[in-house]
Image (cartoon, rainbow, N blue to C red):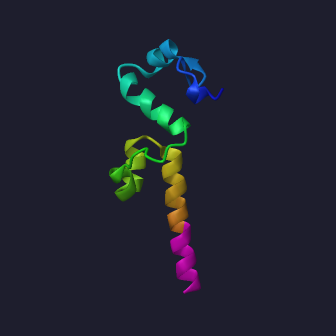
Amino acid sequence: MPPSAEPDLVADLPLDQAHAFIGSRADYYLPRWRRASTGSRALGFNLAAAVFTLHWLLYRRMYRAFWIATGTIFAVLLVEQLVL
């Protein structure tokens, strides 16, 4: 039986441990994670992350992803300047 079909487990954790790990917002996140684990395509869309990607990465303290994205953008711009 897949983990998503098991009502007492969330990501291979018992439900009470998942609640303790997540904290006060567990009632919000657990149904979303269950939907995500079933492959549902209706997960939502984060407009701020789409429009302000680099700023959003910094806001979420995703520094490695920020530098990778910044380096990629810089490399593409550099190649464009050298080729054109």
Percent across and percent down for residue 4 are 57, 29
Percent across and percent down for residue 67 are 51, 53
- Whether residue 66 sits left or right of residue 79 in the image: it is left
Percent across and percent down for residue 41 are 48, 48
Secondary structure, magenta segment, majority class: helix
Q: Using the image as rendered, state which of residue 72 and residue 11 is in the foreground.
A: 11
Percent across and percent down for residue 66 are 48, 51
User: Where does the magenta region start and end?
Assistant: 75-84
- Whether residue 50 sits left or right of residue 35 in the image: it is left
Q: Residue at x 55, y 63 (%)?
A: 72
Does residue 34 belong to the magenta stretch?
A: no
* Up-down relation of residue 9 to residue 38 (above or below): above
Q: Residue at x 45, y 15 (%)?
A: 20
Q: Residue at x 52, y 49 (%)?
A: 65
* Up-down relation of residue 47 to residue 77 (above or below): above
Outermost residue toward the bottom?
84
Outermost residue toward the right?
1
The quarter of the rendered structure image containing the C terminus is: bottom right
Q: Residue at x 54, y 60 (%)?
A: 71
Q: Using the image as rendered, state which of residue 27 and residue 6 is in the foreground.
A: 6
What count of labels does the image hold? 0
The quarter of the rendered structure image containing the N terminus is: top right
